[in-house]
Image (spheres, rainbow, N blue to C red):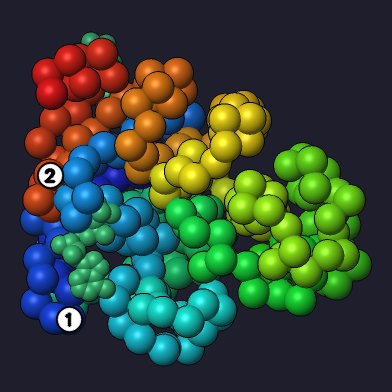
């Protein structure tokens, strides 16, 4: 099956704002797809849906698990979604498959501070594996290994807020990798990185074998890394194809 299959996804925020209007998207296993579109097009809303996180509800149990203070995504099916359906590796994104979907879909937020909430970096990275039922020692071993992969092994015992922005970003990626996702969903991964961190981060992303969906404004990054581009505008996919084709049409 497709790694990611989205059919007719519609989503309206609780305040009535229509963010997605019948989105269709199919991503083949191993592909790297860029999600382009102006601010407000619905990119973040779409990304959150891929692991069943419905944006815009505050303070739920599920949201609290993610530890951040603003509008918290919650797991579940959009009441508003009608026939909307998403499948990951052939599994429907619904309440019943929630744990499995969460394991498979790794989500890297744009702002690392939305994702880091433990007193130390290693606890943050171990959080996912612990949540997946790994024992403490095993979770720690996995966390250290993943910190090594992002070149942060030395920072394991530091508080996340002592790290630079680029380091916090890599710590988040380590936390995502620790759950061994088959699908990586990245929201603006190169935004706010200095040139050197950006290059390193791109190389790191490139080296990961998962299927990737990446919301970005970084066109150089798209041309370098992405097989396909989907262009979102006002909640609709308005173009999809190889980067040269879609970006040439713009
Ligand atoms: P062709 O039939 O010319 O060989 P492809 O095999 O590249 O075409 O693609 C067949 C269909 O699958 C096309 O509609 C294309 O848009 C879509 N497609 C190809 N690659 C991907 C991908 N990585 N993710 C999503 N859709 C894809
Ligand atoms: P993008 O990521 O492409 O900038 P978003 O998915 O953030 O777009 O936003 C899509 C639309 O949904 C915009 O009109 C935005 O104002 C609206 N929106 C985003 N978050 C919320 C929210 N928590 N509550 C209400 N509307 C929202």
Q: Is residue 124 left or right of residue 63?
A: right
Q: Is residue 77 above or below residue 104?
A: below
* Disc 1 residue lies near ligand 2 with CB under 8 A: yes
The disc placed on residue 80 is: none
Say which residue appears at 32% left-offset and 61% top-offset: 49
Q: Could you say which is closer to the camera, residue 225 or residue 92?
A: 225
Say which residue appears at 19% left-offset and 35% top-offset: 231
Q: Could you say which is closer to the camera, residue 147 or residue 30?
A: 147
Q: Is residue 249 visible?
A: yes
View extreme (front): residue? 194
In the rendered image, residue 24, in percent from the top left (x then y), is placed at 17, 44
- In the rendered image, which quarter is residue 51 located in? bottom left
* Disc 2 residue lies near ligand 2 with CB under 8 A: no
Identify the residue position indicated by label 1 in the image.
14
At mark 2, the secondary structure is strand
- In the rendered image, which quarter is residue 133 located in? bottom right
In the rendered image, residue 108, in percent from the top left (x then y), is placed at 51, 53
């Amino acid at each position: 099956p497709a790694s990611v299959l989205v059919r007719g996804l519609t989503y309206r925020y609780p305040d009535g704002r229509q963010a997605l209007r019948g989105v269709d998207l199919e991503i083949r296993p191993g592909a790297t797809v860029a999600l382009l579109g102006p601010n407000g097009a619905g990119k973040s809303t779409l990304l959150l849906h891929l692991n069943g996180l419905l944006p815009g509800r505050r303070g739920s149990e599920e949201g609290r698990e993610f530890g951040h203070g603003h509008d918290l995504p919650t797991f579940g099916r959009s009441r508003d979604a009608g026939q909307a359906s998403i499948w990951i590796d052939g599994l429907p994104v619904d309440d019943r498959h929630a744990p499995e979907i969460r394991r498979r879909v790794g989500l890297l937020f744009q702002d690392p501070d939305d994702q880091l909430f433990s007193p130390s970096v290693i606890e943050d990275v171990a959080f996912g594996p612990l949540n997946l039922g790994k024992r403490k020692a095993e979770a720690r071993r996995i966390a250290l290994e993943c910190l090594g992969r992002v070149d942060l092994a030395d920072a394991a015992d530091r508080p996340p807020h002592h790290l630079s922005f680029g380091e916090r970003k890599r710590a988040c990626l380590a936390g995502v990798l620790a759950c061994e996702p088959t699908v990586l969903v990245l929201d603006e991964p190169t935004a706010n990185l200095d040139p050197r961190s950006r290059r390193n981060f791109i190389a790191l992303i490139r080296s990961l074998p998962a299927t990737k969906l990446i919301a970005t404004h970084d066109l150089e990054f798209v041309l370098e890394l992405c097989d396909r581009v989907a262009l979102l505008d006002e909640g609709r996919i308005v173009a999809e194809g190889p980067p040269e084709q879609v970006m040439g049409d713009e």
